[in-house]
Image (cartoon, rainbow, N blue to C red):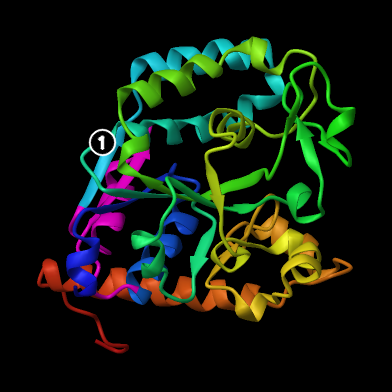
């Protein structure tokens, strides 16, 4: 089976906003670069993405599906934000749940927009397991989490009445089997997205908390090479013996956002500057060049030479 045949019924899905577009462009462009025979679709979930941003994404790939966020999900998130104001800046993270309605695909690769693909991951599209994912920093350190509060625990015996979540995962990179997709999964996840879920907890985790609760016991953990969390590099090295140079997919998580100038200025003086930023910068310039040239070709555009 060729790579194209194996990916015909695969979808790469992500969430974006106009401000997050640089990360999304790089993530999609880098995925397509290392999967030149990709024959599936790219689904971009959004709430009011500008027409200009849509055009920029379509210059990278013709088969882009733009998926609007449902009114029901937006209404639920408004109630959630009113009850827990600390989540207001990241309510859009739960827009990713719209991906579960894409039930026509055999495999769905659900990615955050702060990933950078360095090597192909085709082997995961045929691997066993309904949900393929990578450990979060707590699991990497040998710990678990309280199921009710998502608080890190060294010992599962210390969990409250709801028990412990073991082998917790970072949900920035998920490979989902088609059997997990559909309206039932979508409804189940939305049922968890209520203010009561976060009552009595101060966790900063939002989408990841819900994913870990819902899929507890059904996940198959794979090597962190597929989701190399840069802020957990020390834990990944200690547990799996992997350096960032071994990563197939880099994850610029939390504040490590190479396209945000104010954030990157702070990282200049960080106690551990991340050398891997250079890969993102290279990919950014390459994706801009690719988008520009394809846009010019489509419009029969022309470049003005200096002096003309």
Quadrant of the snapshot with the C terminus:
bottom left
Which residue is more in the foreground, 255 or 142?
142
In the displayed structure, 93 sits above or below 82; it is below
Q: Residue at x 59, y 73 (%)?
A: 247
In the rendered image, residue 87, in percent from the top left (x then y), is placed at 65, 26
Q: Which of 300 and 22 lies nearest the eye of the viewer?
A: 22
Q: Which residues are magenta?
A: 35-63
**Element class at badge 1:** loop
Q: Is residue 48 visible?
A: no
In the rendered image, residue 273, in percent from the top left (x then y), is placed at 79, 72
Q: Which residue is mark 1?
A: 103
On the image, which quarter does residue 130 sit in?
Answer: top left
Position above or below: 250 against 87 = below
Depth check, front residue: 268 or 235: 235
Residue visible at 65% across and 16% down in the picture: 197
In the picture, the quarter occupied by the N terminus is: bottom left
Side of 75 relative to 62 (left or right):
right
Residue 293 in view (yes/no): yes
The image shows residue 35 at horizontal and vertical percentages of 32, 72
């Amino acid at each position: 089976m060729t790579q194209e045949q194996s990916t015909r019924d695969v979808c790469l899905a992500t969430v974006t906003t106009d401000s997050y577009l640089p990360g999304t462009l790089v993530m999609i462009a880098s995925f397509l670069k290392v999967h030149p025979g990709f024959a599936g679709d790219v689904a971009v979930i959004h709430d009011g993405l500008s027409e200009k941003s849509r055009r920029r994404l379509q210059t990278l790939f013709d088969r882009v599906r733009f998926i609007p966020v449902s009114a029901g999900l937006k209404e639920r998130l408004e109630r959630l934000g009113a009850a827990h104001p600390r989540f207001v800046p990241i309510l859009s993270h739960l827009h990713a749940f719209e991906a579960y309605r894409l039930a026509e695909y055999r495999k769905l690769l659900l990615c955050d927009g702060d990933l950078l693909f360095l090597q192909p991951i085709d082997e995961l599209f045929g691997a066993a397991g309904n949900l393929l994912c990578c450990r979060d920093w707590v699991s990497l350190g040998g710990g678990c989490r309280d199921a009710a509060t998502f608080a890190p625990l060294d010992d599962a015996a210390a969990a409250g009445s709801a028990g412990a979540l073991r082998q917790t995962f970072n949900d920035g990179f998920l490979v989902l089997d088609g059997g997990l997709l559909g309206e039932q999964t979508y409804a189940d996840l939305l049922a968890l997205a209520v203010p009561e879920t976060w009552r009595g907890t101060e966790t900063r985790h939002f989408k990841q908390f819900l994913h870990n609760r819902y899929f507890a016991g059904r996940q198959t953990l794979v090597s962190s090479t597929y989701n190399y969390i840069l802020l957990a590099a020390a834990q990944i090295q200690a547990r799996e013996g992997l350096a960032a140079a071994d990563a197939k997919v880099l994850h610029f998580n939390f504040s490590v956002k190479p396209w945000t100038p104010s954030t990157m200025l702070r990282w200049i003086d960080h106690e551990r500057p991340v050398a891997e930023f250079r890969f993102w910068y290279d990919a950014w310039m390459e994706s801009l060049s690719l988008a520009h040239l394809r846009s010019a070709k489509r419009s029969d555009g022309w470049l003005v030479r200096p002096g003309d």
